[in-house]
Amino acid sequence: MTDILDNHLFENKPKPSKRIFRCLLVLQIVVSVLSLFFSLNDVESIVVSGPLTSLLGLLTLVAAWYIKSRSGILIGVSPILISVFWFIIIVQFNWSPNTAFFPVNSSLVLAVVLTVAFGIKAYARP
């Protein structure tokens, strides 16, 4: 009986919710890096990558909230906020792709660097 309890209580496998979070986190980092490269090539690609990273960020946010990972919550909410911010700025000021190229890509570089840094932290300790 104690063997069964010991195996159950001292199980070292991560819980399914942590595994799901880690998978979403890795996917979020990969998609963020790819989105940055596409945006550096053609800034209009944010029309597709913005909603895609926001949807993935929402899933990451929910998974991080469930396991109470502060770094994961930050990673999940950041693409949503960045997408909404740039959508409002571009529409409000009627920016052309040439006008938006430098400020959008500058913020994306910073966001991806922070996403990778916080992602490593969140992956190591969810």
Image: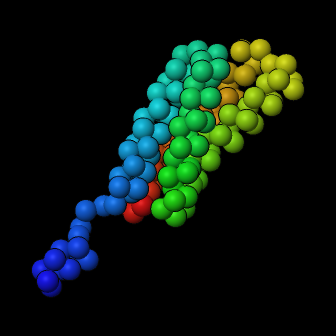
At x 53% / y 37%, what residue is drawn? 56
Furthest toward the bottom, the residue is 2
Query: Residue 18: which quarter of the image?
Result: bottom left
Q: Judge from the rendering whether residue 79 lies leftward or rightward of residue 15; answer left or right.
A: right
Furthest toward the front, the residue is 1
13 in relation to 49, above or below: below
Q: Position of residue 90 (x, y in %)?
A: 79, 25
Quarter of the picture containing the N terminus is: bottom left
At x 68% / y 34%, what residue is drawn? 83
Q: Closest to the observer: 106 or 43?
A: 43
Q: Position of residue 66 (x, y in %)?
A: 51, 59
Quarter of the picture containing the C terminus is: bottom left
At x 40% / y 56%, what residue is drawn? 17
Q: Closest to the observer: 107 or 3?
A: 3
Q: Visible in this render: residue 75?
A: no
Q: Judge from the rendering whether residue 74 lies leftward or rightward of residue 85; answer left or right.
A: left
At x 43% / y 51%, what residue is drawn? 21
Q: Position of residue 2 (x, y in %)?
A: 15, 85
